[in-house]
Structure formats: structure tokens, C-alpha cells
Amino acid sequence: MAKYTGPDCRLCRREGCKLYLKGAKCNSEKCTLNRKYAAPGDHGKGRKKNSGYSIQLREKQKTKRYYGVTEKQFKMYYDRASEMRGVTGENMLVLIERRLDNVVYRLGLGTSRAMARQIVNHGHITVNGKLVNIPSYLVKAGDVISVKESKRDSELWTAVKETKNLSIVKWLSFDNTTLTGSVVSLPERADITDVDIKEHLIIELYSK
């Protein structure tokens, strides 16, 4: 099965870092990593020497799980990035950052990428005035992302409207009163700072 249906916190424990899969819980004392830092399984606390391949694989798995994409999608972004000018690893991360579900999450409309993906799937989001329910849709500079007008009175958006100081990345802008954001510019590699991603390891893995 392509979709993971187990506990999200188990993935964070496996990768040994916060992947921010549970929204507000990840930034609270209830975060599972505060209590169980070892990897899941009977041998999670065991010591073993990681091979070069396993280090590369774990970096790929961590990044894939952080963004919530499937293996097929992740490989597709690598293939597309390798055909672009510039550094392949940076191009790959920028492409994934441009996904609509990620943008909805970055705008603060969803507390996690999983929630943002569901919001898009359920038809709450418009891009340049047109309904878009495809989470993998890639935004462009100048695009206007907004909550569909007929959905704005939903209880789902009450907390967002009342939040005055949303933490928005610099390549996006957002007006919480109208629930409308815009893509000021395309993201850059330097904008991805919440998780330590070593993209060169992923490129080395796929290049074999």
C-alpha cells in the first residue's frame, strides 16, 4: 500500500527528528520524541554502524515523509529536477515546496501537511479564482491562493481569522481577514530551515 496508515509519531521516531506531522502537538511537551527518542521496534535502542547506503536511504525517507509524498512522486521530482539548470538537489526541494498542499500549510491554513492536503482535496482552495483540488499542483510566482468564498464562514477558518501574527515564510504573503495569500516569489533552498535536509545524499542515492 502506497499510503502510510500507521502512527505519525512512529515516523518521527524512526527518522530521529521532528517531521511536524501532528501539527501543534509537535511543538508541545506532548511530542512523542520528548518521551521516546529511540527508533521503534525491538532493536530500536541497539547500536549499529550505518552503511553509506543506509545513511542515504534514511535521508530520502526522512524528506519524503516530511513532505508527505509517495515514492513515485518523490522520484518524479528528482527526475524533473535533474533536467533543470542549477543544482539538482536544490531544484528538487524547491519543486516540492511549490506543491499546493505545502503552500496551504505554509500559509497557516492547515496545522500539518496532511490537514492541508485534505483541505485541498475537499475543494476549499482556489488558485487565481479557480477551484483546484489537486494537492500536487505547482504554484507559480504571482499566484493568488484563497479559501473558496462559499467556505469562508466554516468553523474551520475561525481560528485562522482570529490569529494576528501568523508565521509565514518570506516567499508568501497572507491576509487572514480575507483568507487570501499570494506567492510573492518562488521559494529558495535557504527558505527551508525547519528540518535539516541533506539533499546531496538523496542525489547520491538516486544516481547509483
Image (cartoon, rainbow, N blue to C red):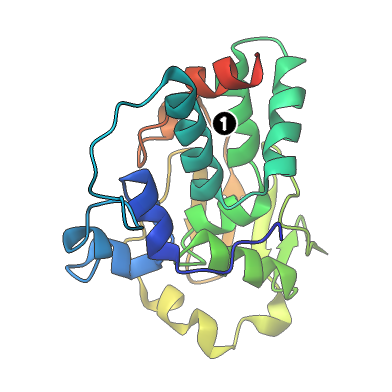
Mark 1: secondary structure: helix
The part of the image, by quadrant, that contains residue 179 is bottom right
Q: Quadrant of the N terminus?
A: bottom right
> In the figure, is residue 43 to the left or right of 121?
left
The foreground one among 27 and 149 is 27
Task: Give the residue drawn at x 37%, y 39%.
Answer: 195
Q: Which residue is mark 1?
A: 93
Q: Is residue 70 above or below residue 25?
A: above
- Of residues 27 and 176, the one nearer the viewer is 27
Task: Please give the name of the residue rendered at 52% of the width and 89% of the height, measured from the top-left corner.
Answer: 155
Displayed quadrant of residue 8: bottom left
| Point 77% across, 15% down: residue | 83
Dot 1 alpha-carbon crowd within 10 angstroms: few under 14, some 14 to 19, many 20 or more: many
Farthest top residue in view: 86
> Which quadrant holds the C terminus?
top right
Q: Amino acid at mark 1?
A: Leu
Q: Is residue 128 visible?
A: yes
Q: In front: 25, or 53?
A: 53
On screen, residue 102 versus residue 136, left or right, reads left
Image coords of residue 67 (percent x, y): 54, 48
Q: Pinpoint residue 153: horizontal percent, then vertical percent.
A: 59, 88
Residue 69, image x, y percentages = 64, 49
